[in-house]
Image: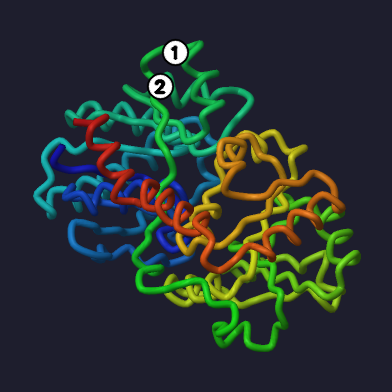
Amino acid sequence: MKDAIVFGYDWETANAIERVALALARVGVKVLHCDSAASALKKPDVRLRQIEPNLFTFKPWVYSHRLNRLPALPRIQSDMVVRQIFDHARSLGMEKPVFLYANLGKFLAPMCEAVRQRGCRPVHVAMDYVENLSPLHVAQSDLTLAFSRTLCHRMRAVWGDKIRQVPHGIDLRPFRNLRASPENPAAVLSGVPRPRLGYAGAFASDFLNIPLLRELLERRPDWNFASFQARTKQSRISPVATLSNAHSLPWQAPREFAECVASFDVGLMPYDCSNTVLYNGPPMKLWDYFALGTPVVATPLIHLWEYEDLLFLGETAKELERAVETALAEPADSPLRQKRKELAEQHSVEALGRILRSILD
């Protein structure tokens, strides 16, 4: 496998599809990453920029996404985006690159058709568990990669070997030479007393079980919960922000983010198990905690069951309280911490890149 185009969302979000681009670049594949197209009215910066060796990104533009409501416009605007992509691909010396995409919306059919006409292979990346099995995206692809094991099995029952399951990957570079050290916290956490229960992501009320989290924090006012503000200005106010032991941290760059995670006594993932997508999805944040060996307390998502010997699960506030108490009592030299780190290494972006190359070659 020589070259790849990855049509994603926004490079700065480091979403699952962006990690696919990073993973391929780290194993020597030349990668052109494309942000989702922006309206020309927003005057996007469309310049090609290099992220690191083998990895480049840019943001294509269209006249307006609202125009896609008109019958002929999706194809016209899709052709615009495809021309921008392959102009950059040619400037990078790419030859018939694999084209990986997550969700192309109304651009799906015309873009996959245009990609095939250029001798490229369209590969769908199913990022989340979905009830409708993404039939249109799978049908347009030559191959579909699924992160969710349950989604993979459901898709394979319909499409057979066209579906392959791949793990999430974490960029471990920001965590290198760090160790879990809540006794010596990052500056933004210096005013937050221990023990610190940290959620390694932007607070999202549609992801977390808010009543459960609130009850846990009310039961234990001596514990402090910390999460991050969203990177965008549209961040929501946390429904637990009124509690004195709930803290909101500013969005951090990768290295500073890793230092914050190293300041947590416990990695807390109180996800809403009533949400089918979340319940069946592998939580990427698990590997942020495991990269440092930090004990994790979580609600029992399906993808966490296989790690029950390395983390602590609970469904009710009382069960989570007991789980946190057990996690806090874990010795600093516990062999579980090293096992978590070793497992995180197996889920590095480099490991993901090797798996992707073996599938896509």
Q: Secondary structure at mark 2?
A: strand
C-alpha distance separating marks 1 and 2: 7 Å
Location of residue 225 by image quarter? bottom right
How far across and down, in percent of the image, does residue 163 sit? 40, 21
- Which residue is found at the position 69% from the left and 33% from the top? 276
Quadrant where the image shows the N terminus: top left
Q: Secondary structure at mark 1?
A: helix
User: Taking the image as drawn, is residue 25 in sight?
Assistant: yes
Up the image or down, 292 lies above or below 80; here it is below
- Between 337 and 234, the residue placed more toward the observer is 337
Residue 355 horizontal side relative to residue 329, left or right = left
Marks 1 and 2: CB-CB under 8 Å? yes
- Between 83 and 233, the residue placed more toward the observer is 233
How far across and down, in percent of the image, does residue 284 sit? 52, 50
Q: Which residue is mark 1?
A: 159
Q: Which residue is mark 2?
A: 163
Tell me the number on the disc at residue 210: none
Residue 14 horizontal side relative to residue 220, left or right = left
- Which residue is found at the position 40% from the left and 52% from the top? 342
What kind of residue is marked 2?
A: Ile
How far across and down, in percent of the image, does residue 343 sit? 43, 48
- Which residue is found at the position 83% from the left and 67% from the top? 240
- Which residue is found at the position 37% from the left and 39% from the top? 78
Residue 145 horizontal side relative to residue 210, left or right = left
Mark 2, Cα crowd under 10 Å, few <14 / some 14-19 / many 20+, is many
Up the image or down, 247 lies above or below 164; here it is below
How far across and down, in percent of the image, does residue 256 sit? 47, 77
User: Taking the image as drawn, is residue 62 in sight?
Assistant: no
Location of residue 173 by image quarter? bottom left
Mark 1, Cα crowd under 10 Å, few <14 / some 14-19 / many 20+, is some
What kind of residue is marked 1?
A: Trp
